[in-house]
Image: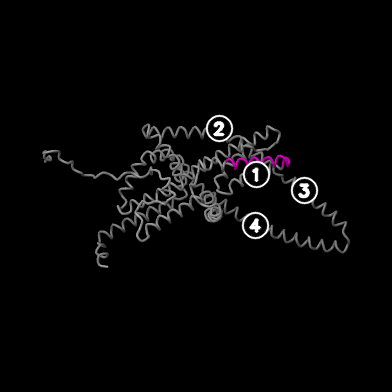
Amino acid sequence: MTPFFSLLTPRRVARWLLVLSAIYGVCWLLWSASSALTPFIIGIVLAYLLLPLVNRLNARQPRWAAILFVYLGSFAVLLIFFAYLVPPLVSQISQLIGAFPRIAQIQQWSDQIVAEYQKILASLPAGMRSGVEQNVSVLINNGLGTLRTNFVTYLQGLGTFLINSLLSVVNTVTFLLGFFLIPFWLFYVMMDQQAGVTTLDRMLPAWLREDFWSLVEIIDYDVGAYVRGQIILGLAVGTAAGVGLLALDLFGLQVNYILLLAVIAAITELIPVIGPILGAVPAVILGFIDSPTTGLVVLALYVVIQQLENNFLVPRIVGDSVGLHPAVLMVLLVVCSQVFGLAGAILSAPMGAISRDVFSYLYGRLSEPPLPAGVLPDRIRSARRPVPAKAPPPPPEQAAPEPEGDQQPAE
């Protein structure tokens, strides 16, 4: 016990208290300003997605030129998206909303139901009629009471929502300012990535450095390959669904809202396991609304798309990026969506893979005898690639040059 307490000098204790106070202060500031940090969170996601392309282009041209080239490409994609895809997409959403029955039509349907009920009631014997009327009256009164209670609850929730929305307007300027700063902030983040990593590497204790970068590589492997692969798969499936539905429309099988259905197929592809099924449901329903033949053909189209995706695209784009059994993925999907919402459903697969691989690595490091630092799980080690974020250790700051031959060092 004596050697341990001998290390607790007043200067060392004060330094650790200073570090803990700084960490607490930074965390408190970030938590207090969490509502205004959404643009920067989006910027971090964009930086993570764009950095591999910037690093690859940096091998052939200066880093600032690579970043500007990626910027121009991204702005071109956004311009095409807002110019050619958003207007028809908004139009189709408006048409879909307009296709819903209006209040007058719902009232007409309810009047028809009441008229049919009166006819059926009039055809019943007198004794049976009174019993049916009494039971229906009880059901209607109970239903109206429940509806009235729920309506009051909904109004209270609506009032709370309006008040919160009014208060949130105060933060709109800060929020928009953050979005305005994203391109500039993102430029400096990507420009000084290596310098920031080198600084972080220098700040880490020597005994922690190898383990820290190993955990970074595990997280980068599990998240990077999966997210980028799912984005590519979403674009491919959405395009295939749009082209297939358009082809069916050309052959006389009418399916409305083709662009909207293609976007739904692309977005739901991000949800593991059940995403393709969710993306196919609206198209199949609209197909059956047209005719049973159209519904069956649309169903067959989505089945073919999923078979082509699973047999040709997934092995080449995603591969075994998470290595989790579908049964485990289903449980993770339900649990993560319950705890973290939609984001948890989308990221359930990489979150499960990260938890498994980090546990495997730490378990090996804590075993007897411990595995050496940097020994990654077999699945990652077999597909290991250089870690783009890890920088070589900095050279000594004040290393004097070695004297050559008989020369004496300069005084």
Residue type indicated by callout 4:
Val
Q: Which is more N-terminal, label 2 or label 4?
A: 2
Mark 4 is surrounded, within 10 Å at the Cα level, by few (under 14), some (14 to 19) or many (20 or more) other residues, namely few
Mark 3 is surrounded, within 10 Å at the Cα level, by few (under 14), some (14 to 19) or many (20 or more) other residues, namely few
Residue 314, given in percent of the width and then of the height, sits at 53, 43
Is 143 on the left-hand or right-hand side of 80?
right
- Residue 304 included in the magenta stretch of the image: yes
Residue 22, given in percent of the width and then of the height, sits at 34, 54
Q: SS of the residue at dot 1? A: helix
Quarter of the image for the N terminus: give it. bottom left
User: Magenta stretch?
Assistant: 289-308
Q: SS of the residue at dot 3? A: helix
Residue type indicated by callout 1:
Pro
Q: SS of the residue at dot 2? A: helix
Q: SS of the residue at dot 4? A: helix
Q: Which is more N-terminal, label 3 or label 1?
A: 3
Q: Residue at coordinates 55% horizontally, 39% vertically from top-left?
A: 235
- Against 388, residue 156 (above or below) is below
Q: Cα distance, mark 1 to mark 3?
A: 24 Å
Q: Which residue is mark 2?
A: 83
- Against 252, residue 32 (above or below) is below
Magenta stretch secondary structure, dominant = helix
Residue 246, given in percent of the width and then of the height, sits at 64, 34
Q: Which residue is mark 1?
A: 282
Q: Which residue is mark 4?
A: 152
Q: Residue at coordinates 53% horizontally, 56% vertically from top-left?
A: 339
Query: Quick one: 343 or 125, which is closer to the camera?
Result: 343
- Residue 62 included in the magenta stretch of the image: no
Residue 239, given in percent of the width and then of the height, sits at 58, 36
Q: Which is more N-terminal, label 1 or label 4?
A: 4
